[in-house]
Amino acid sequence: MQEKVYEALKKANIAITPEEKENIEVADFGLGDLENTGLQLLVYVNTDRYCAKELVLFPGQTCPEHRHPPVNGKPGKQETFRCRYGKVYLYVEGEKTENPHCRPPKGSEQYYTVWHEIELNPGEQYTIEPNTLHWFQAGEEGAIVSEFSSHSDDESDIFTDPRIKRIPEIED
């Protein structure tokens, strides 16, 4: 999968180092259905003040609904998504879009509750405020999104779907 992500980044003219290629993370959220519910990411930097990463989604792949809550008295993560390649549909709190382009992965429909659609094409961006429910799905050709945010703390993300495990677990 890392090779597939590397090729997608190359196609979008996003150069990465061999070390970065080895650090590409594949997240299936513990559901074992990466093709439909999953995300590939490359974190460039994540300090206590800011974070920058690439999010790579293959056609129709969905990052499930979640929010970034306050942690230890600090506001949750604020993030700006900038589409670099393809098309991504972002769903956030707000007025429901009449005919949304996307559907949740089969069997998970009940865990998708926000339906205000933001369509991002290359060069377009949107900022998600802290503690805002959101989810996103790639269009037909997939999508690459640069994320710029405050500190990223995946362990504190709250997913609507209780089956999701953001941090991989090692089983004996």
Image (cartoon, rainbow, N blue to C red):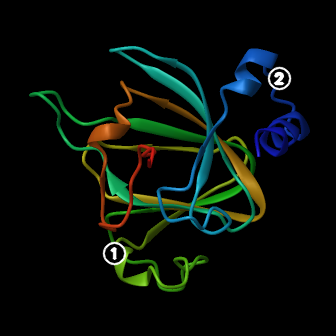
The answer to which quarter of the image holds residue 160 is bottom left
**Where is residue 9 drawn, in percent x and y?**
81, 36
- The secondary element bearing badge 2 is classed as loop
Q: Residue at x 68, y 68 (%)?
A: 60
**Where is residue 45 drawn, in percent x and y?**
53, 17
Per the model, the C-alpha gap separating discs 2 and 1 is 36 Å
- The secondary element bearing badge 1 is classed as loop
Q: Amino acid at mark 1?
A: Thr
Q: Amino acid at mark 2?
A: Ala
**Where is residue 124 drawn, in percent x and y?**
63, 45
Q: Residue at x 36, y 75 (%)?
A: 111
Question: Which residue is more in the foreground, 18 or 151?
Answer: 18
Q: Is residue 59 above or below residue 109?
A: above
Q: Is residue 108 above or below residue 153?
A: below
Q: Which residue is mark 1?
A: 113
Q: Is residue 17 visible?
A: no
Q: Which residue is mark 2?
A: 15
Q: Residue at x 87, y 31 (%)?
A: 13
Q: Is residue 58 above or below residue 26?
A: below
Q: Is residue 146 visible?
A: yes
Which of disc 1 and disc 2 is earlier in sequence?
Answer: 2
Query: Which label number is shown at residue 20?
Result: none
